[in-house]
Amino acid sequence: MIRLLNVSMMPPDVGQPVLRNLTLTVPQGEFRWLLGASGAGKSSLLRLLTLETRPSAGQMDLLGVSISQASRTTLRNLRRRIGFVPQDYRLIGEWTVFDNVALPLRLRGASERDTRREAFAVLEWLDVAHLADKRPGTLSGGEQQRAAIARALIGRPEVLLADEPTNALEDAQARRLLATFQELVEMGTTVIVATHNEALIRETPAASIILQDGTLAGTDIQDGIAALRSNKA
Ligand SMILES: Nc1ncnc2c1ncn2[C@@H]1O[C@H](COP(=O)(O)OP(=O)(O)OP(=O)(O)O)[C@@H](O)[C@H]1O
């Protein structure tokens, strides 16, 4: 469960909040599109939910943990339960795809045997197992994106957050990725996907979090589509 109550977020060097008075709840095991025009605050909200930044006001509960009261150890453990696919992939260029994907489990001290088994399970799930020994720079954008998704999934997160994950994907690949997200939802994972992909959200209507100028502007998918269109105005 994700619960925000009057949450605002102000980056340290910015004079005003980029998110204002957000109040929303996403029950565990549900899917949400995260929609809004460019600059509306989608990435900022994802940064809050990945615990990269903290609210400057309000109350945020993630997976039963109240963020404002949590110790560093609690927050570190909580981060492990949240998978994130950043817009720019953030794969380490000198490492193989396998080593990139294995990183979260290695950091947790998992055995090499378990790490290999899990890494290949997610690489196969994302159809990139054949690229395990390649360096990210030699892959297409879509392949890098799937490697980044595999890295987000390796720890079997309870919450998966993805920032424009279909950007570099062909239509058929985007649909398959969405099917993977739906499988995760069926397994009880909360999935939040920021996107500008109007065709995809039309095909898969779902409840949405719609942001406008850093505030919550609604939850109805049709309003979300209208917000996306204001991008192109
Ligand atoms: N650390 C920061 N410092 C200064 N401004 C910031 C910072 N983070 C976000 N902003 C500002 O907050 C607003 C929201 O940005 P954000 O990246 O969250 O929007 P977005 O909806 O993800 O946009 P896009 O769809 O273009 O990725 C923008 O005006 C941005 O310039």
Image: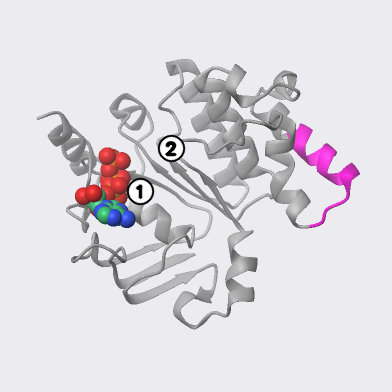
Say which residue label 2 marks.
Answer: 87
Q: Quadrant of the C terminus?
A: top left
In the rendered image, residue 103, in percent from the top left (x then y), is placed at 71, 45
Q: Is residue 37 above or below residue 28?
A: above
Mark 1 and mark 2 residues within 8 Å of each other at the beta carbon: yes
Q: Is residue 71 above or below residue 134?
A: below
Say which residue label 1 marks.
Answer: 43
**Would you say the beta carbon of the disc 2 residue lies within 8 angstroms of ligand 1?**
yes
Q: Residues within 10 Å of mark 2 (few under 14, many from 20)?
A: some
Is residue 115 located in the magenta-colored stretch of the structure? Answer: yes
Q: From this viewpoint, is residue 37 visible?
A: yes
In the rendered image, residue 197, in percent from the top left (x then y), is placed at 32, 29
Q: Measure the alpha-carbon separation of dots 1 and 2.
A: 9 Å
* Relative depth, front residue between 62 and 175: 62
Q: Residues within 10 Å of mark 1 (few under 14, many from 20)?
A: some
Q: Which callout, 1 or 2, points at the residue further toward the start of the chain?
A: 1
Residue at (31% x, 24% y) in the render: 199
What residue type is disc 2 on? Gln
Which quadrant of the figure has residue 152? top right
* Relative depth, front residue between 190 and 211: 211
Residue at (45% x, 16% y) in the render: 170
Q: The magenta stretch spans which residues?
A: 109-121
Q: Is residue 103 above or below residue 81?
A: above
**Would you say the beta carbon of the disc 1 residue lies within 8 angstroms of ligand 1?**
yes
Element marked by disc 2: loop
In the rendered image, residue 72, in percent from the top left (x then y), is placed at 59, 75
How many numbered marks are there? Answer: 2
Element marked by disc 1: helix
